[in-house]
Image (tube, helix red, strand yellow):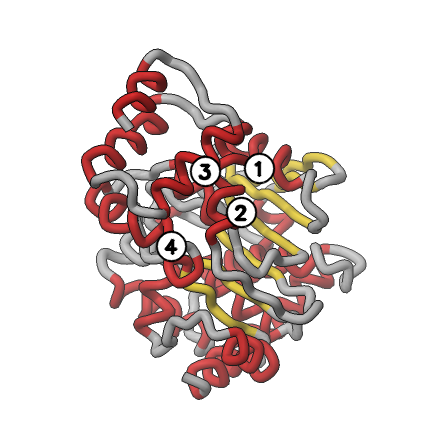
Amino acid sequence: MKKILNYLFEHRTLSREDAREILISIGKGAYNEHELSGFMTVYLMRSITIDELMGFRDALLELSVAVDFEGKKVIDVVGTGGDGKNTFNISTLSCFIIAGAGHPVAKHGNYGASSVSGASNLMESVGYKFKNDQHALRKELEVSNMCFLHAPFFHPALKTVGPIRKNLRVRTFFNLLGPVVNPSKPAYQLIGVYNLEIARLYTYLLQHDATSFAIVHSLDGYDEISLTSDVKVITSDGEKLYSPSSLGGLVANASDIAGGDKVEDAVKIFMNILEGKGTKAQNAVVCSNAAMGLMLTDEYNDYSAAFQAASESLQSGKALSSLKKLIELQ
């Protein structure tokens, strides 16, 4: 690792193959925590290149526990995290709304590294038991339209760096990898990013995959549709800028989507929204993100129809029912 660090400290970048080999070594436990901290720090001081991102992704997928849903076209909604905004779990709520609307979801997530409550913190708190048993995961999809893929159960390399990421409490390049290494290789991906530079990297990456994708970035820095500002949406067809009112019918304030100070706060907000006790702004935000995800499936002619389907899923209790069915299987 000393040789690698000295190379990188000279402002050089890795080739795709070198990046792949280094992350495979990380996954096999070849380096100690101090060496790994130094390596991750490099990418806090400069941007990751597309070759490095592709190489790291190649390694994680190569080392991952494969998931086969037997041709079922699943969707994932996920953000990079690391935006420093501490919102409630908007992506996870959006996934349950999509599931309630009838589309299968394979949500990929992890414990919060730079946020109070990551998707895994939330799912564990509501009674979900992490697993990588394919039969059980298929059963969950069949019964509830939803399953959860806790990243360390599928990516051995993440187990090695997890404690270090938690101690650093800042975003690292692993934040960028999480959204693009779902082991089920979803047919549809809605990915939120914290800046437009990352959006461009993802666009290049995802255009090489046989997936339908949308990358979203709220211009005030949120890695999701926050309704606090205009949002840029990038798909294979190009880029569009949307106003909050055109997506959710209102403009939200930062306080409307705050996630609280501890995991228990996030769980309370999550359950309140699913149980029909969410505020108008909270409901609008989660339905906006769910609607953008539903648009990727080509089952809706326009955004308003997708938003209506998302709202109906939430207000009718179908999204909550998806959660209840999922937890009953644990």
The residue pinned by badge 1 equals 202
Q: In this view, does 309 lie above or below 87?
A: below
Can residue 280 be seen in this snapshot? no
Q: What element carries label 1?
A: helix
Circle nearer the viewer, 3 or 1: 1
Say if mark 4 contacts mark 2, CB within 8 Å.
Answer: no
The residue pinned by badge 2 equals 180
The residue pinned by badge 4 equals 156
- Amino acid on which disc 4 is placed: Pro
Q: What element carries label 4?
A: helix
Q: What element carries label 3?
A: loop
What distance separates the C-alpha of mark 1 from that of mark 2?
8 Å
- Amino acid on which disc 3 is placed: Tyr
Q: Where is residue 77 in the image (x, y as percent from the top left)?
A: 54, 56
Q: Position of residue 240 (x, y in %)?
A: 68, 37
> Residue at image x 57%, y 37%?
202
Circle nearer the viewer, 4 or 1: 4
